[in-house]
Image (cartoon, rainbow, N blue to C red):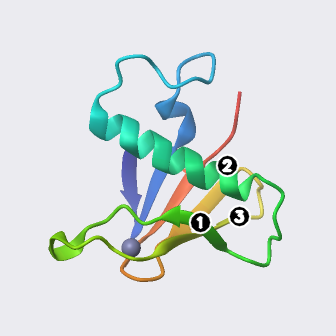
Amino acid sequence: MGRPIGGTWATDMRHCLDALGAIPDGLPGPALNLTLFIGAIVAWVSSGRSAADPRTNVPCRRSPGRRRCPGEIFASFEADRSTIVWHCPVDAREKWTTDARRE
Ligand SMILES: [Zn+2]
């Protein structure tokens, strides 16, 4: 679902959805959880909120040392308005980009 590009992980929302733009039936639990997580980030950034505020209400899903990270994801559109860059301000060493285009 993701691939590294020089310290940044790239994902494509289209790989998470079926041809109708819905979450496929029978998606395995880990893939479903990741799809819902990325979908929440895309929904937040696409909601029309202020672009100057990168904070979301999406909780980080990492658990370093088996302790849940208390961070909430920071996310914003790139200039192309289809790529979202996001990271956790607490523990993430890498940034993620998500192509949020709908076709
Ligand atoms: Zn975190």
Q: Position of residue 12 (x, y in %)?
A: 52, 42
Q: CA distance from mark 3 to mark 2?
A: 15 Å
Comes first in the chain, label 1 or label 3: 1
What residue is at 57 percent from the left and 50 percent from the top?
40
Q: Is residue 14 above or below residue 69?
A: above
Say whether residue 55 is left or right of residue 6: right
Q: Nearer the viewer, residue 10 or 38?
A: 38
Q: Quadrant of residue 50?
A: bottom right
Q: Nearer the viewer, residue 87 or 68?
A: 68
Comes first in the chain, label 1 or label 2: 2
Question: What is the crowding at mark 2: few (fewer than 14 residues within 10 Å), some, or many (at least 20)?
Answer: few
What residue is at 76 percent from the left and 56 percent from the top?
80
Amino acid under label 1? Answer: Asn
Instruction: Name the quarter showing ligand 1.
Output: bottom left
Q: Position of residue 21 (x, y in %)?
A: 62, 24
Could you tell me which secondary element the residue under label 1 belongs to?
Answer: strand
Amino acid under label 2? Answer: Ala
Residue underneath mark 2: 43
Could you tell me which secondary element the residue under label 2 belongs to?
Answer: helix
Amino acid under label 3? Answer: Glu
Q: Quadrant of residue 39?
A: top right
Question: Which quadrant is home to the C terminus?
Answer: top right
- Considering every residue shown, the one lying at the far left of the view is 65
Say whether residue 49 is left or right of residue 64: right
Q: CA distance from mark 1 to mark 2?
A: 11 Å
Q: CA distance from mark 1 to mark 3?
A: 19 Å
Q: Quadrant of residue 8?
A: bottom left
- Nearer the camera: disc 1 or disc 2: 1
Residue underneath mark 1: 57
Comes first in the chain, label 3 or label 2: 2
What residue is at 79 percent from the left and 78 percent from the top?
52
Residue underneath mark 3: 78
